[in-house]
Amino acid sequence: MENIVVVGAGQAGASLVARLRAKGFTGSVTLLGEEPQAPYQRPPLSKGYLLGEMPLERLLLRAASFYEEQGIALKTGTRVSAIDRAAKTVRLADGTALPYDALALTTGSRPRMLAPVIGGDLAGLYPVRGLADVDAMAAEFREGARALIVGGGYIGLEAAAVASRLGLKVTLLEAAPRILQRVASPETSAWFRALHLARGVDLREGMGLSKLLGRDGRVCGAELADGSVIEADFAIIGIGIHPDVALADAAGIALDNGIAVDAHGRTSDPSVYAAGDCASFPYRGHRIRLESVQNAIDQAEAVADAMLGDETPYVPKPWFWSDQYDVKLQIAGLNTGYDRVVVRPGAREGTQSVWYFHADTLLAVDAMNDPRAYMQAKRWIEAGISPAPEAVADPANELKTLV
């Protein structure tokens, strides 16, 4: 194998090319990214970067010199228009064709946006996905400005926290009966509801958006499902993401809730691999996608190993986090299929952990400002060990003594 091309210069793409060199690959490595910046961290965009606490230099995953030193051809501001599987080339928007022996798609995901029919084409609407999105909205964060946030998932709640901290008047709409409904228990939702209400966020759950209102082509408010109207100076759209599969789809590569890969990251074309947000893979008898930094790094490294002949299957050890105000939420495991929840008060005020079980098997934990509970649960989950739910619920019991 002489030429490896990686399409998508995010966390997964950067991790994959670094792993290839670390494992001794001496052939040609090319990393293609649409954005003009070198690969950078995305999670801080809606937190530290938006607050002005993290400069661009600290966002970068590697110093710019790393790619040159490692002999990695990093091509930013470069769009791939097509994959020719028969010729084993990727065609760039400028007409250039790059040959590959192995190709990796780390194209990530794209934000879901509102339809034009309900005002999704107005100015003053912002997703929170890339650096350009956050840079574009930064000027809107003026004290006293009215921010409308559509979507009560982690991205929406993080944006609400930043806006509230900066003195904006925040209204957050969630069409589902509760915030975080897709990803967390009612107990975790209740904890974060109370947190945001205490900080002055106008939180409206079970409230759909009928349409955005505009003036001179720019958003100025919204009409809600109950007929009420609210005013807004700008809006942040946090209604989820979808895997970026356009290139794979056009090339005839199999899809299944993303680009379908096997346990080694191979697609239906054995010369093409995928990793990160865009890829769905087998896990415990199901096919899943994981939208997390952990998965982007670990799966990308597994793909690099597979390209070099290491056939070790990828088995994720899921973990996630969210920062809101002075609260750090740490999540270990996947709560899919839980039928029992145990709430454990933390050792200090304002701390708590929520434990998810299926029968007596520990699946996941949400730890709010409780790193000890998070670390202990993470060890148990990864080791396949489950403490008794009743014992976890009793704060008098030291966690480390339960198993």
Image: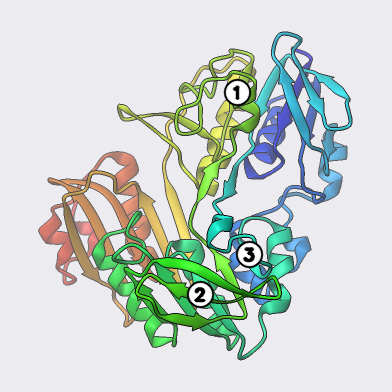
Of 16 and 173, the residue lying toward us = 173
Q: Residues within 10 Å of mark 1 (few under 14, many from 20)?
A: many
Q: Which mark is residue 126?
A: 3
* Left or right: 391 in relation to 300: left
Q: Which mark is residue 222?
A: 2
Q: Secondary structure at mark 1?
A: strand
User: Spatial distance from mark 1 to mark 3, Cα to Cα?
Assistant: 32 Å
Residue 85 in the image: state x and y as whole percent.
69, 13
- Report the mark closest to the observer, 1 or 3: 3
What residue lies at 68% left-to-right and 75% top-to-bottom?
A: 53
User: Spatial distance from mark 3 to mark 2, Cα to Cα?
Assistant: 15 Å
Q: Residues within 10 Å of mark 2 (few under 14, many from 20)?
A: many
N-terminal of the two: label 2 or label 1? 2
Q: Amino acid at mark 2?
A: Ala
Q: Which mark is residue 198?
A: none
Q: Which mark is residue 273?
A: 1
Mark 1–mark 3 CB contact (< 8 Å): no
Q: Amino acid at mark 3?
A: Tyr
Of 27 and 228, the residue lying toward us = 228
* Left or right: 57 in relation to 105: right
- Report the mark closest to the observer, 2 or 1: 2
Of 93 and 27, the residue lying toward us = 93
* Left or right: 314 in relation to 30: left
Q: Amino acid at mark 1?
A: Tyr
What residue lies at 74% left-to-right and 55% top-to-bottom?
A: 60
